[in-house]
Image (cartoon, grey):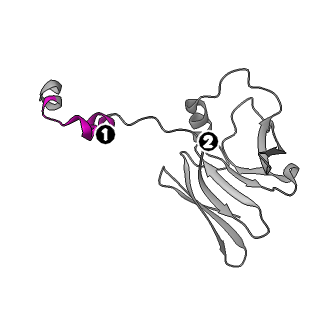
Amino acid sequence: MDKWILRRNVNPKYKVDELNEPPPRLPGIRSLLPLPGGDLLTGGTDLRIRRWNHYSPDRTYCVCGPNVKGIGNEDFYETRSSFGVQVVQETRRRPLSTKLTTKAILAAAATDSAGCHRDSILSLASVKLNQRLLLSGSRDGAIKVWK
């Protein structure tokens, strides 16, 4: 059917165009898991799981995620105050010489030997069996278990 005929018969308040071409997803955190003692695990669109330590920001680290060639662990964590609220913020030691694209991150994830997720991390859970385990699920349908 002709696109014009479809549009002619559709009420504009239903915004069918948005269903046909959804807006791009904004980058960011998609999953939070508070831990005993106040630490926080996050997972998001950058395919990384981070453990945030708000008492000692220098002890905050990336649990897993793609390692982009030529970019080592150049992140550091510091505490800032924003409107009277203490915030731990991730910052790069050196600015990237080129913009890190989604395509580059996905390519790094595809070749990552540690087995990181290949798409956005959507859920995190903690389970204690003989030892405490971290479970993560991503938009690619994979569920991973981390020691």
**Residue pointed to by mark 2:** 46
Location of the N terminus by quadrant is: top left
The x, y position of residue 62, in whole percent, is 74, 49
24 sits to left or right of 106: left
What residue do we see at 51% from left, 55% from top?
142
Disc 1 element: helix
Question: Which label was assigned to residue 140?
Answer: none
Tell me which secondary structure the magenta stretch mostly adopts. Answer: helix
What residue do we see at 63% from left, 58% from top?
32
Q: Residues within 10 Å of mark 1 (few under 14, many from 20)?
A: few
Magenta stretch: give its range.
8-20
What residue do we see at 25% from left, 38% from top?
13
82 sits to left or right of 117: right
**Residue pointed to by mark 1:** 19
Residue type (three-letter) at the residue carrying disc 1: Leu
75 sits to left or right of 42: right
Instruction: State how many labels appear.
Output: 2
How far separated are the C-alphas under marks 1 and 2? 25 Å
Q: Residue furthest bottom?
A: 130
